[in-house]
Amino acid sequence: ELAKQKNKMNKQRELQKIAEEIQECKVCKINKSGLAVPGEGNPNAKIMFIGEAPGKQESLTGRPFVGRSGRFLTSLLNSIGIKREDVYITSPAKYFPGYRAPTNAEIAHGREHLQKQIKIISSKLIVLLGNVAARGVLRRSFMVSKFHGQLLKENGQDLFFTFHPSAALRFPKIRTLIKSDFKKLSKLL
């Protein structure tokens, strides 16, 4: 138990170092605004959720998934008996890009920070919330509509695809699909 606590503190320290790198990173800030949103959660999380980029609310608080999409994600987690504080949540882009998706260059740059976080947390499962998350982790696009609800093993890492919560808020059909994906996710745990 003591070793586990010490490991958690070390991981927390490493994640804090990355957060500071992100806050000082000039490239991360180009054409973006607000506070850095490095990510948050349990450094020993068994599941890591990767989104797209911070929105307006996130850029004001420095915390991921705190707006409408975040409330929806939290309710999805609760629906399968997972507490938000038990997972780790982040995204490839670490600053608010305005009301647009991050560019390929922004995703490629953000991947440097993201890969360090993935390595430190070393979760059993990474849930990719949408195509930007897939590009951030896998360096290639996926048609989420085709791959959602599926598990992929890549470089020894289990990856699970689903839609971004913001898409589910906009489209009732996607809302139904994401809820069913989360039921599949709960069976994998």
Image (cartoon, helix red, strand yellow):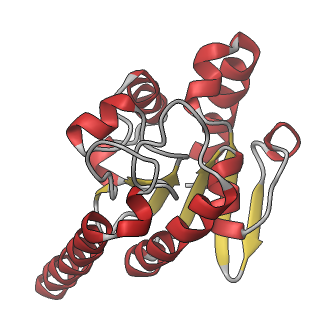
Residue farthest toward the left in the current orientation of the protein: 2
Q: Which is nearer the eye, 171 or 53? A: 53
Q: Position of residue 9 (x, y in %)?
A: 15, 78
* Residue at (21, 72) in percent of width and height: 16
User: Does 168 sit above or below residue 6?
Assistant: above
Position of residue 8 in the picture relative to residue 87 (left or right)? left
* Residue at (42, 54) in percent of width and height: 90
Residue farthest toward the bottom in the current orientation of the protein: 3
Residue farthest toward the front in the current orientation of the protein: 31
Which quarter of the image is occupied by the C terminus?
Answer: bottom right
Position of residue 42 in the picture relative to residue 53 (left or right)? left
Position of residue 88 in the picture relative to residue 127 (left or right)? left
Image quadrant where residue 55 sits: top left
Which quarter of the image is occupied by the N terminus?
Answer: bottom left
User: Does 11 sit above or below residue 123?
Assistant: below
Q: Position of residue 2 (x, y in %)?
A: 11, 84
* Residue at (73, 26) in percent of width and height: 177
